[in-house]
Every structure is written in C-alpha cells, then in structure tokens.
C-alpha cells in the first residue's frame, strides 16, 4: 500500500503520545525538528485506537487510509440525504464518489492527518446544513469544528472561512423566499462557527505547542512542482470542476430551501480548487493546488448530486423514462470518480521500507540493556535532511528520543574522528552506530545484525536481529478496518444522537466523524490531567467517552418524548419533493 514519506512521522508521533503522553510532543523532548505539537489530534486518536485494539502504530498506518476513506464516505452519504435532502437510497453513489475518489487517495498518500480532518469537516458540513434549516445541531457542528482544529488547524481555519462565506452568500443571494428564513440561517450558522472557533482555540491552548507560523511554500521548488504535475491529472479538474458547477446550479434551482443551502455550501467549497489553480499558475502564490484541490471534496459530491437533481427535474415533467438517464449518469460519475482513485492507489509504489524497520529493531535490541540516558549518535547522509529523523523514531523507544542525535559524518578508514560533533566524542559511553538505511560505513564497526554497524560504544550483549514487518493479509486488513470503524461508530454515535436530531441512519453515518473529533478533543484533555493514553487508561477513556455519549442521547430522547414539539414540519428526506412549512419549503 502506498504512503508518503510523512507516514514515518505519523508513526513516531503516535508512539510518543502512546508511550509518553501528549506533553512529550515537543522539540525539546523528542529531539526532532518537526514534532507538530500544534496538531495533536491525529496521534491522540491513533493512540486511543491502539489501546482499544492492541494494534501497533505501523499496523494502523496500513489501515487508516481505508478506515478514514470509509468514514468519509459515510459522512458524504449523510451530506446527501440529511444535508441536501436527497433520497436515502441514492446516498450510496455519493459515498462511493467521495470516499473512493482521487481527491481522497492523493490525500492519503503523505497527508494522513488531512484525511482524518476530511472526515470531521464533512460531518461539520452536514451539521451546518441542518442548522441552516433550523434543526438541532449547533453544538454538534461546533464540537466537530473544534476537533478539526486539533487535527490540522490551518485547513480547519480554511473550512471555517468557507462556512462563513457560505453563510454570507445565504444572506445576500437573490430573494427566492422572504428575508426572515435567510436571516435566521445566517444567525444560526455564525453562532455555530463562533462556538467552534472558541472551542478550537481552547483546545489549542491545551496543546503542547501553539501555532507560531505558517509553513513556508516556495512555488519555484522543483519538489512542489513535481507534486503538482504528478497529482493534479488524477483530479481531472478541467472536467470535474465544470461538472461540479453544473451540479450546484441544478441544486440551486430546486424549490426546496434545503437543496439551495446545499448548493451554496458545495459551490463555495468547490471554489477553493479554482482559487488555488489561479493562485499557483497565474500569480505564483504559495498555494499548492494538489493540496487545496484535494481538500475540495464538494467537487465529487456536487457532481453526483447534480446528476440526480437533473433527473428530478425531468421526473417532474412526467417523462419518467427519460429520468432514468440522469440517474444512470450519476452512477456512472460515481464509478468514474472511484476508478480514478483506485488508479492512484495501483500506480503508487510503497515508500515504507521494511528493512529500515528491521535495522531499527536490531538497534533497539542492542540498546535495551543500556541506561535510557545513554547518548546515541546515528550517522546519516548530509543531504537527507528531515527524512532520517522521521524514519529513525518509528521503532526506537520514545523515552530515548531526547538522547538520540542524527548527524552527517565522514565514515572513512582514514578519518578516525568520523567528523562527529564534540559532544559525541567527549561524553564517555556514547554509542555511535551506522545503519545501511541511512548511511553505510565503509568497512568500519562491529556488525550488530544485517545493515547495522556499531562504530563505538559498549560491547553488544545478545543482540536480536530485527525481522522486516509484513503487511496483514487483505482479508485480515478488511476485518480490522470494520472493527476500527465500529469503535468510531460506538464512540461517536451517542454524541451524534444527543447533539443533533438526525434520523438513525444519519446518526450512524456521521458517528465516525464525531468519534474522531471527540476522541481527539477529550483525549487531549484526559492526557493533560494525567490519564495515560495507553493500555487500561486509554481503553477506559474511550469507554467513558462512548458511554457518556449514549447516556446523553438517552436523556435527550426521554426529554424530547415528554416535551411538545413546536418546530415546523420537516420534509421527509426520502421523498423527492418535501412538504412546505411556515418558514417555506425545506
């Protein structure tokens, strides 16, 4: 299975959080150049999933693309049925189009935290559309937005801005109904966004690090240019963008207010792909289009929903035979989008290298009898920059990270000092090793195992050579993904039911999004008050979060049963043309 180089970083960050706690995710503790303490949500979620399932971080890296793509597809299905008021039986095509698209596949290759973010913001989009129609979901949307901030605050801020723009468009768009419903929708959306910003900011204050600066992006860098050329073709933006525009236009022409709300949100969300293209290719601005366009998940959703909307317009004219054509086109579009995503997966070569993990396990075995404070120097090539750090931390014990340094050094028989920094030579007992994965020494050192050479340090004692890891069998992977998805549904389902008035299928669809957001947020709080995210501590925290949600859902359900409802009648999402209410058509 293909992954980007950042996968190594996600593995070691999860190991740090799992073994040492979230407070250790800082440069001072990990001795790493990019610990990402301002984005703690993703390693917290994976650490808690490790505790519940007993899987390793490496196994989770194999499984999370399928897990989050499935969760994203479920949330997209809810967007179609509960947000855009599409027939429930049609939502499967939207789920396939979004979850299986190249937009998701390219996100999974190198940007795992972004993929988890996509799940949460899709759930927040559902809540935004519910809130705009006057349904319960304001706190639900705010909590999802706060969880998104902890996963990736930059793209979460972008999505909050998109929702704000959609709210403004709702307010000022041509008056197809009276002004009161539009003003109410604007007020509800801005309140949800305000709550989300406050909760997200509070979460960042609990994080190990505060955001300090945006990452530097140089449009002229060959690496970025190569990524743009590699990733953009699979998104087929010259075709998918016009189809999304057509889809949002057809939804906007529908007489149901819920459809028009969805059209505005999908249109604004899709526009970031066009903005990034113009910014990159016309103005040379540092907005890599492969990342911005990959976040425009509204494009595949709007494409399929637009085809269904065209079928509805034809059906209203009593030409039922012709109405099958747009519906068939929707299915074809969903299959085409999923096929493009599958092509991305099949065309990529794996970047996780098995022998690196084996060599690091050999080094771990050698270091096991030595004190944790033993200084360890790993030799590396000068040009490798950050990559060896991410790779080295994947298997080594996290409590040794502050005492491990990777340096570029001369390893030649005629250079006995190896060019090491003074600290590595002056401290007695310093271990200096070379791994073939990072730098092969020219016949120097004592072999500890295949590819591992001890340059200096205590004599080895019963070192066990590491075995290269193997990916699980496909059936085992699929079964484990189902288990992980069930954990997220169980964790978030109660909260989704308590904080919104979605129907049962809608709750099940957005439950994984709530699971990811709430595990990240409450896991951060729990870790800060001293609850370990591993073993029984992690399992107990997940159980407490899940049970609290279901108890809250039960209490809300009992309250609603005993309280008369004065809300306007809601359109049945399963019907193509809902009934009207006092506020206008739904």
Image (tube, grey):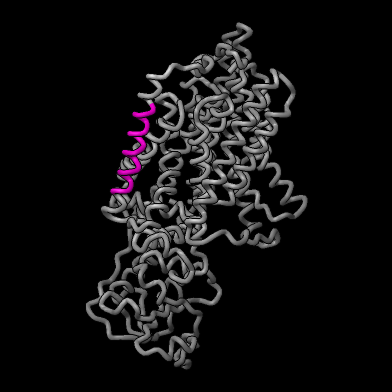
In this rendered view, identify the residue nearer to me: 361 or 162. 162
Left/right placement of residue 134 relative to residue 514 reads: right
In this rendered view, identify the residue nearer to me: 549 or 267. 549
Magenta stretch bounds: 540-556
In this rendered view, identify the residue nearer to me: 148 or 142. 142
Residue 338 seen by the camera: no
Where residue 92 sits in the image (x, y, percent)?
47, 27
- Which residue extends farthest right? 283
Q: Quadrant of the C terminus?
A: top right
Q: Residue at 71%, 19% (x, y): give it.
A: 176
Q: Residue at 44%, 63% (x, y): give it.
A: 25
Q: Is residue 363 above or below residue 218?
A: below
Q: Is residue 78 above or below residue 206?
A: above
* Main secondary structure along the magenta-highlighted residues: helix
In this rendered view, identify the residue nearer to me: 224 or 136. 136
Where residue 456 sits in the image (x, y, percent)?
36, 87
Q: Is residue 22 above or below residue 546?
A: below
């Amino acid at each position: 299975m293909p992954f980007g180089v950042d996968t190594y970083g996600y593995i070691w960050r999860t190991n740090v959080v799992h073994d040492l706690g979230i407070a250790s995710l800082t440069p001072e503790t990990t001795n790493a150049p990019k610990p990402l303490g301002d984005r703690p949500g993703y390693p917290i979620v994976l650490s808690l999933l490790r505790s519940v399932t007993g899987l390793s971080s490496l196994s989770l890296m194999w499984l999370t693309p399928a897990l989050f793509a499935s969760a994203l597809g479920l949330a997209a299905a809810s967007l179609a049925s509960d947000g855009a008021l599409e027939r429930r039986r049609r939502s499967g095509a939207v789920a396939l189009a979004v979850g299986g698209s190249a937009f998701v596949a390219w996100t999974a290759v190198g940007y795992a935290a972004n993929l988890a973010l996509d799940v949460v913001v899709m759930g927040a989009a559902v809540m935004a559309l519910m809130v705009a129609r006057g349904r319960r979901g304001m706190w639900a949307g705010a909590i999802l937005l706060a969880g998104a901030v902890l996963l990736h605050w930059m793209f979460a801020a972008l999505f909050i801005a998109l929702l704000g723009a959609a709210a403004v468009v709702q307010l000022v768009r041509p008056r197809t109904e009276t002004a009161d419903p539009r003003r109410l929708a604007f007020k509800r959306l801005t309140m949800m966004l305000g709550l989300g910003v406050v909760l997200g900011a509070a979460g960042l204050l609990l994080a190990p690090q505060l955001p300090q600066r945006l990452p530097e992006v140089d449009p002229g860098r060959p690496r970025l240019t190569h990524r743009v050329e590699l990733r953009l073709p699979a998104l087929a933006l010259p075709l998918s963008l016009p189809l999304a525009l057509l889809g949002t236009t057809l939804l906007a022409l529908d007489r149901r207010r819920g459809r028009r709300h969805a059209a505005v949100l999908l249109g604004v969300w899709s526009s970031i792909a066009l903005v990034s293209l113009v910014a990159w290719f016309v103005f040379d601005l540092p907005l890599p289009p492969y990342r911005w366009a990959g976040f425009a998940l509204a494009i595949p959703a709007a494409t399929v929903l637009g085809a269904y909307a065209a079928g509805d317009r034809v059906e209203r004219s009593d030409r039922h035979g012709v109405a099958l054509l747009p519906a068939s086109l929707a299915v074809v579009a969903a299959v085409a989008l999923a096929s493009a995503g599958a092509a991305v997966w099949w065309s990529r070569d794996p970047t996780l290298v098995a022998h690196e993990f084996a060599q690091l396990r050999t080094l771990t075995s050698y270091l096991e009898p030595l004190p944790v404070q033993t200084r360890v120097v790993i030799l590396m090539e000068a040009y490798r920059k950050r990559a060896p750090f991410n790779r080295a931390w994947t298997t080594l014990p996290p409590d040794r990270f502050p005492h491990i340094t990777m340096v570029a050094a001369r390893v030649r028989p005629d250079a006995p000092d190896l060019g090491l920094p003074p600290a590595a030579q002056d401290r007695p007992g310093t271990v200096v090793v070379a791994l073939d994965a990072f730098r092969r020494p020219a016949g120097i050192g004592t072999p500890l195992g295949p590819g591992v050479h001890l340059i200096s340090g205590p004599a080895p004692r019963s070192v066990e050579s590491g075995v290269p890891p193997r990916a699980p069998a496909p059936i085992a992977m699929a079964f484990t993904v189902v288990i992980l998805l069930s954990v997220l549904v169980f964790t978030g389902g109660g909260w989704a039911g308590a904080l919104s008035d979605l129907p049962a299928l809608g709750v099940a669809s957005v439950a994984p999004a709530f699971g990811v957001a709430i595990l990240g947020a409450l896991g951060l709080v729990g870790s800060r008050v001293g609850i370990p995210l591993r073993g029984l501590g992690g399992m107990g925290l997940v159980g407490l979060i899940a049970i609290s949600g279901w108890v809250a859902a039960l209490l809300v359900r009992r309250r609603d049963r005993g309280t008369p409802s004065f809300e306007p009648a809601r359109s049945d999402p399963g019907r193509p043309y809902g009934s009207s209410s006092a506020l206008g058509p739904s």
